[in-house]
Image (cartoon, rainbow, N blue to C red):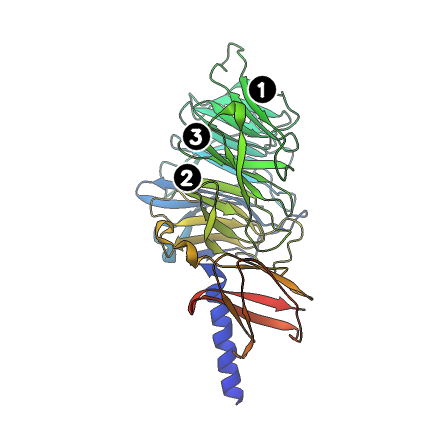
Amino acid sequence: MKKASILFLLIFFLRIDLYSQQNTNLLFHWEDTTLVGSNAYNNTYNEIWGLNINGSEIAVIGSTAGTHFFDVTNPQNSSEVAFVAGAYTGPGVIHRDYHDFDGYLYIVCDEGSPSTLQIVDISNLPTSVNIVYDSNNLLNKVHNIFIDTATAKLYACATGEAMEVFSLTNPSNPTLIYTYNDVGHVHDAYVKNDTAFLNCGNDGLRIMDFTMVNNSGDTPVELASYTSYPDAGYNHSGWLTDDGTIYAMQDENHGYDVKMLDVSDYSNISVLATFNSGVDPNSMAHNGIIKDNFLYLAYYHDGLRVFDISNPSNPVQVNYYDTYLPNNHNSYKGAWGVYPYLNSGNILVSDMQTGLYVFELTTSPTEIKEEKNPSYIYPNPITSSFIINNLYADLIIMYDVFGRAVRTEKLNKNINIFNRNDIKNGLYLIEFYKEGLLLSSDKIIFN
């Protein structure tokens, strides 16, 4: 009997590992336990970036120590191939940020005195890198950078000024061409062909035309200001679709939804949809990138979340992988950044506490059936009653750690509220079915 119980327990935990994700396989994970976490959030790691270079795929991840380069071309045999120490290192570091252009990687940090702008020649990867610029003459502390590759301009956000714009005509020797201070703060930017979508924290969204900005002193033109919208909070970041009509935007506040904006007419911007991970009322999205018809989100405590936005009025979650446990949704922890542009289609994610992840989507998003999407339970952990937000399933079965079915419930679409009843404290597996077909599973905790 004891052996049978152990077998059930092992099967249960293997199934939990399997179903902590949907249509997403972990190919590689790295963390270095010798590195220190930050004093603020205990985050050892921060931003992620990716490079397709010399036939190889490179993951770039920031830490409290500096910048790590991994050859992830063959994910199962990934290895660190280069490292650039930060100008400022240690537990005071929270943020680093990256962008590449014309064979160079640009690195900034938002803490330390001094921090520097670091420019790294990456043309010899995966063999080595070469630092060609490391100085605070142009930039010291910087929160985020974005490079408009079409016009060779680097936008440095929250530098002490709201934002500064640099020419990269000479990529290894940037030149300051404009300082933007029309708002108090620019947290992040997305820029394409001189049209800049500026996420201005508590001042909402600004859309600016920087076409005429150059050393002659010409000024940008404001195309739109958008400050009143559902769940308006701290406007953190966003990303534009390739056709320039849809902007996905994250307000960095616990419990606030992601917004899909119609920006096809700057004089009439509207919110097409608001949505979230469905995990917890306090969930919070961080950074997102759009590739094709999919929005890839680093969703802090809820890990990687991928949404099909082919119908921007009805985003559908098609992939996820939870990189952070326990999921108490306090403070700022979990998935920080995501990068979906590797040639292989593999996805890079950085987790603040647990490091670098390389994922593959086991089912191509274009092949995922909408009815296969999971339902979501909150709160989790559960103390008394709980809610299942459901669109597709018609039945749930709950199993204890010994594999015994302890509860079966029929589901209605949308909101289902259940009392705890006599469920004992502990870890359980809940399976979602539609017409007898298993759609998904997830773990829940009663305490």
Which of the two residues, 198 or 88, is positioned nearer the viewer here?
A: 198
The residue singled out by tag 2 in the image is: 129
Quadrant of the image occupied by residue 236: top right
Tell me which label, 3 or 1, sits earlier in the chain.
Answer: 1
The residue singled out by tag 3 in the image is: 244
Q: CA distance from mark 2 to mark 1?
A: 31 Å
Q: CA distance from mark 3 to mark 1?
A: 25 Å
Question: In this image, 312 relative to 385: left or right?
Answer: left
| Picture residue at 53% right of the left edge, 11% below the top | 218
- Label 3 is placed on what type of residue? Gly
Q: SS of the residue at dot 2? A: loop
Depth check, mark 3 against mark 1: the one in front is 3
Q: Answer yes or no: do the residues labelled 3 and 1 have beta carbons within 8 Å?
A: no
Q: Is residue 51 visible?
A: yes
- Label 1 is placed on what type of residue? Thr
Quadrant of the image occupied by residue 171: top left
Tell me which label, 2 or 1, sits earlier in the chain.
Answer: 2
Question: In this image, 176 relative to 383: left or right?
Answer: left
Tell me which label, 3 or 2, sits earlier in the chain.
Answer: 2
- Label 2 is placed on what type of residue? Val
Mark 3 burial class by Cα count in 10 Å: few <14, some 14-19, many 20+: few
Q: SS of the residue at dot 1? A: strand
Question: In this image, 316 relative to 86: left or right?
Answer: left
Rendering coords of residue 89 (x, y %): 60, 42
Which of the two residues, 316 or 131, is positioned nearer the viewer here?
A: 316
